[in-house]
Image (cartoon, rainbow, N blue to C red):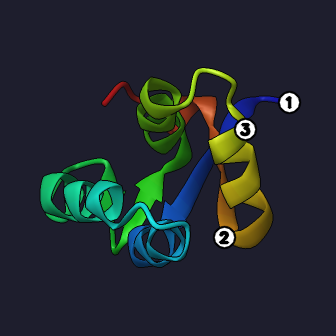
């Protein structure tokens, strides 16, 4: 493959999922920190950033894997010639 995928999740959906998991404080933190951030495009947050944040909460990675089952991940293909480092 001559590129990479740009995986994102809707930040509001992630927040709602965290509220259902009784972790509203984490969802509120994500919304406050990333609502206007460059990693958040049109309400879609990069999954690698979310995964890194969840890794600080749960070293097993189970929390993020559970969320992946319930929250839609949007994937877009980015060719190498359009790739850049954030």
Q: Which mark is residue 62?
A: 3
Residue 23, image quadrant: bottom left
Q: Mark 2 vs mark 1: give the one in front.
A: 2
Given residues 43 and 32, the one toward you in this image is: 32
Q: Which residue is mark 2?
A: 71
Q: Considering only order in the chain, which callout, 1 or 2, is on the residue closer to the N terminus?
A: 1
Quadrant of the rendering where the C terminus is positioned: top left
Badge 1: few (under 14), some or many (20 or more) residues near its Cα, within 10 Å?
Answer: few
Q: Check contact, mark 2 vs mark 1: CB within 8 A.
A: no
SS at badge 1: loop
Alpha-carbon span between mark 2 and mark 1: 26 Å
Alpha-carbon span between mark 1 and mark 3: 29 Å
Side of 71 where 2 appears, left or right: right
Q: Which mark is residue 1?
A: 1
Q: Position of residue 84 (x, y in %)?
A: 40, 29
- State the residue at coordinates (65%, 65%): 74
Q: Considering only order in the chain, which callout, 3 or 1, is on the residue closer to the N terminus?
A: 1
Q: Position of residue 58 (x, y in %)?
A: 55, 30
Given residues 86 and 62, the one toward you in this image is: 62
Q: Mark 1 vs mark 3: give the one in front.
A: 3
Given residues 19 and 5, the one toward you in this image is: 19
Q: Is residue 83 visible?
A: no
SS at badge 3: helix
């Amino acid at each position: 493959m001559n590129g990479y995928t740009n995986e994102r999740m809707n930040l509001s959906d992630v927040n709602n999922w965290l509220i259902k998991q009784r972790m509203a404080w984490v969802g509120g933190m994500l919304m406050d920190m990333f609502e206007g951030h460059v990693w958040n495009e049109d309400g879609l947050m990069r999954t690698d950033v979310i995964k890194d944040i969840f890794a600080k909460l749960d070293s097993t990675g189970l929390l993020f894997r559970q969320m992946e089952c319930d929250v839609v991940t949007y994937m877009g293909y980015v060719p190498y010639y359009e790739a850049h480092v954030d």
